[in-house]
Image (cartoon, rainbow, N blue to C red):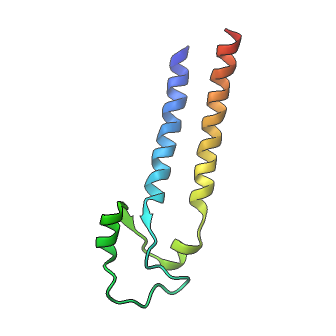
Amino acid sequence: HLLAYFEMLQRDADRFSDCLKRTDVMPLGSGALAGVAYKNIDREFLARELGFGQLSQNSMDAVSDRDFVLEYEAAASLCMMHLSRLAEEIILW
């Protein structure tokens, strides 16, 4: 019975892990709509030093898209629902 909760929480952990992969993108150098005019910025070096996994590929997408927020909120909502179910069962036990 409790293994069902393990499966649910494992899927939740996978969702958070996937979300982190998509938010671990460095937008530095992506000025609003046009990038940045500074030619001497080494974005790869900065991303490595700041601990980012990858660089943004499109400046407009990097500075204007907020889908990562909704993705996190959806994952958090599902996780809270599963934890609520578990808490209810523990209370009724």
In the rendered picture of this protein, how many numbered marks are placed on residues?
Answer: 0
Q: Is residue 76 left or right of residue 31?
A: right
- Note whether 79 is above or below 50 in the view shown: above
Q: Is residue 65 left or right of residue 91?
A: left
- Note whether 15 is above or below 2 in the view shown: below
* Residue 39 rendering spot, x and y as whole percentages: 34, 90
Could you tell me which quadrant the C terminus lies in?
top right
Residue at image coords 67%, 27%? 84
Quarter holding residue 2? top right
Residue at image coords 47%, 40%? 14
Instruction: Looking at this view, name the residue that lies furthest to the top.
Output: 93
Residue at image coords 51%, 87%? 34
Q: Nearer the viewer, residue 31 or 70?
A: 31
Q: Is residue 72 left or right of residue 40?
A: right
* Residue 52 rendering spot, x and y as whole percentages: 37, 61
Instruction: Looking at this view, name the residue that lies furthest to the front.
Output: 49
Q: Is residue 85 left or right of residue 52?
A: right
- Note whether 52 is above or below 79 in the view shown: below
Quarter holding residue 90? top right
* Residue 43 rendering spot, x and y as whole percentages: 34, 75
Could you tell me which quadrant the N terminus lies in?
top right
Quarter holding residue 60? bottom right
Residue at image coords 42%, 74%? 57
